[in-house]
Structure formats: C-alpha cells, structure tokens
Image (cartoon, rainbow, N blue to C red):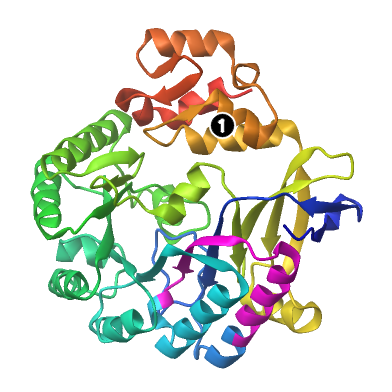
Amino acid sequence: MQQNVISSGTAGGATSRLAPQDSLALYIHWPFCLSKCPYCDFNSHVFPEIPHALYVDALQRELAHEATRLGKRRLTSIFFGGGTPSLMRPDDVARLIAEATRLFQPVDSLEVTLEANPSSTEQARLAAIREAGVNRVSLGVQSLDDAALKRLGRQHDAGEAIRALEMARHLFDRVSFDLIYARPDQTISAWRDELHQALALASDHLSLYQLTIEPGTKFEAEARQGRLILPDGDEAARFYEVTGEIAALHGLGAYEVSNYARPGAESRHNLAYWRYDDYLGIGPGAHSRLTCVDPTGDVQKWAARRHRAPSLWLEHVNQDGHGTKAETSLGPEARAREALLMGLRLQEGLTSESFMRKTGQKLQDCLDATILGAARDEGYLTFEDGHIAATESGRIRLEALLAALVL
C-alpha cells in the first residue's frame, strides 16, 4: 500500500503513516434542515436559503484532500447524514458518490445510505435519489401518531410517513426508519399498537430510540420548567423490553442497543463505528477515526473533527482544502475505552483478539474486575473464552454499567 502521511495537528506537528486497513466507511454531513426539532442536539441548522453549490464544491474538495492522505482505501459504505440530506439536489448526491468511488476502491456490495424525511416534498425526490446511486434509505418517521409528531416538531403527519415508507419499499431494496418511544404521556399499550403497525410496514431494518433530554435543546428547557415529563427509569426499561419482544415477533433482532434488523440487513456503515473500524467524516462537525503507524512502528488510532459551524467550516475548506479543527493521536487508554463503549452496544460483543488488534491493549486489563464479576453474577454480561457481550438485561442498563466497568 502507498504510505501516506497524516499530520497530528494538535499533537505537536509529528507525522505518522497510515496503517494498511481492509476497509473505510465514509460519512458525508449535510447540516441543513427546514426546521429544528425540539429534541435534536445534532449539528443541524436552518438557513433562509441553502447554499447548495458552495457547499457541495467544498465537500468535494475536502474529500479530495483526505484521499491524497489515505490512498486507494477499500470503500465499504457511504452514509449521507444530517441535518436533512434529502434536501440535497439529486445531481449533487450523484456527484459526491461518483467522486468517492473514483478516489477510493468501492467494494462490489457498496452500501450507500441517505437519510430522508417523509414529507411530501422530500418523497418526490426519492426516485431521483435512487437514480443518483443511493441503494439504502433511512426515513426519519419518529412516530405514527399525529399528536406525537406535532409534539416532536416534525414537518409530516402519519399519513405522509406511511406513504413515504410504501414508496421507499418500492424504490429501494433496503429501507430503514426511525421511531422514538418513551414519549411524554405515552403508554405501553399505545406503543405496542404503534410498533406492530410500524413493523408491518418495515422492510429489513428499524432504529428505535428512547426519547432523552439533550443539553441545549428546546425539550431541555421545557423539562427544567416542569412542562415536559418523561417516563421514569423502570417504565423506560419496560418500553425497551416490549420493543425487543415485538420486533422479534416480526423477525427483526436487536443487533445493537437501538437497532433491529433481519439477518444480513444490519447497517454496514454503522457497524464500522461499533466495531471500531476506520471511518472518514467530511462536512461540518464530522468526526473520523483512522488507524496509523507512528514513527516507532506502534499502531495508533487518530481522531479528527471538523469545525462545527457550516460557515466556519466552509471558510477553512476554501482556505486550506479541509475544515479540520483538531486531529490527535489517541493514547492506549482512550482507544480501549472507545472500543469498549462502542463494542458492548452490539449483541455480538467483542473478542480479546479483535480488541488487542485494534487498541494494543489486553481486554481484561481494561475492565474493573470487581464490577465485571458482579455484572456476570447478575446476568448483565457474559465473558467466556476471551469474548465479552452484554445480555438483554445488561443492554437496558448499559450506560450505567459501562461507566463503572470500563477503567
């Protein structure tokens, strides 16, 4: 493989060679939305007019900049996230896909996902998005209840969501959509009915998220004022249990804490994150993790993040060819912690061999032995023959469990 150089940026200007890797997942961030949802803390922005040409030119330039450093890596997935990528012009989507597959080496089964909203305006773009080269669509349905959609600040109603799902299933071989549960005043019985209806419409993949209060959102302000009350911990856990039960009845298994799929239909792009494989993110606020070899021959993982504000990112791309804000080498402890925090979200868990290869650390050295023993005794974790995984009951408590378990 061509040996390229990556600058450490904040790490003092040292250089490292990119380590040979089998795969690279590419994330392209489109930060523009028509409105800001009250629960959303993603890097999304509402502009009076979207600067399509300027922004896509900058994305292409940043992609080319990274390709000169990475070489002809094997490209396994492209994911257009946001924001609302279905607001993009289909010709621009096609242009970025073509550039990515020219600069990198796409696998035969390249997965190309684009997030879309179910509104009538965006439904009209689905056929053109498919023609642009997208082969998997992820619809931000969030609910099939009109009152809940209004409370969540969505721009579509349940009827539009159902029509969008039916259209997507006709156009795409692979379709996913999101739902949010444990909403204010939602009952377990209502969620059962809504989820059965949703799964009757599902294709092969579903993302089911518990509503959480994120800092800086409108919902956080409402919660502080007592105007927004969510189910308590025990009730939220029951929602999670019911979610898994009903998904299983429809043939979808929980391969990750919040993601359900038929066998073989898992999101290949998101698996790259959870398995701690290499991924490249371009666009405002995007993150990357790239495996490198330092001057002494040690394997390292480099973390990069772009400027978050679209205007600032655009300014830096025009000046420097990229909008990187910081790029640093992660130490052994940071690598181990990230790999565990991501890998234990997966039903498959992770192995000592894979963990050592990706972090340079022994798995057992990175776990609190006392907490590990207690978690095994309580049935929250399994740890046998160098393989660790969270059980279903462990995944319900995963956030608290990881905080205590990972050194």
The residue positioned 45% from the left and 9% from the top of the image is 374
Residue 60 falls inside the magenta stretch: yes
**In the picture, residue 33 is in which quadrant?**
bottom left
Q: Which quarter of the rendering shows the C terminus?
A: top right
The residue positioned 56% from the left and 67% from the top of the image is 105
Check disc 1 and give the amino acid type. Ser
Residue 401 in view of the camera = yes
- State how many labels appear: 1
- Residues 301 and 38: in front is 301
Residue 220 in view of the camera = no
Residue 124 screen position, x and y as percent:
25, 86
Residue 347 falls inside the magenta stretch: no
Residue 259 screen position, x and y as percent:
32, 46
Q: Is residue 338 above or below residue 66?
A: above
Q: Is residue 36 above or below residue 142?
A: below
Query: What segment carries the magenta color?
Result: 57-85
- Residues 238 and 78: in front is 78
Element at label 1: helix
Q: Is residue 259 above or below residue 66?
A: above
- Residues 185 and 53: in front is 53
Residue indicated by mark 1:
354
The residue positioned 72% from the left and 57% from the top of the image is 1
Question: Left or right of 332: which side holds 262?
Answer: left
Residue 100 screen position, x and y as percent:
56, 74
The residue positioned 65% from the left and 21% from the top of the image is 362
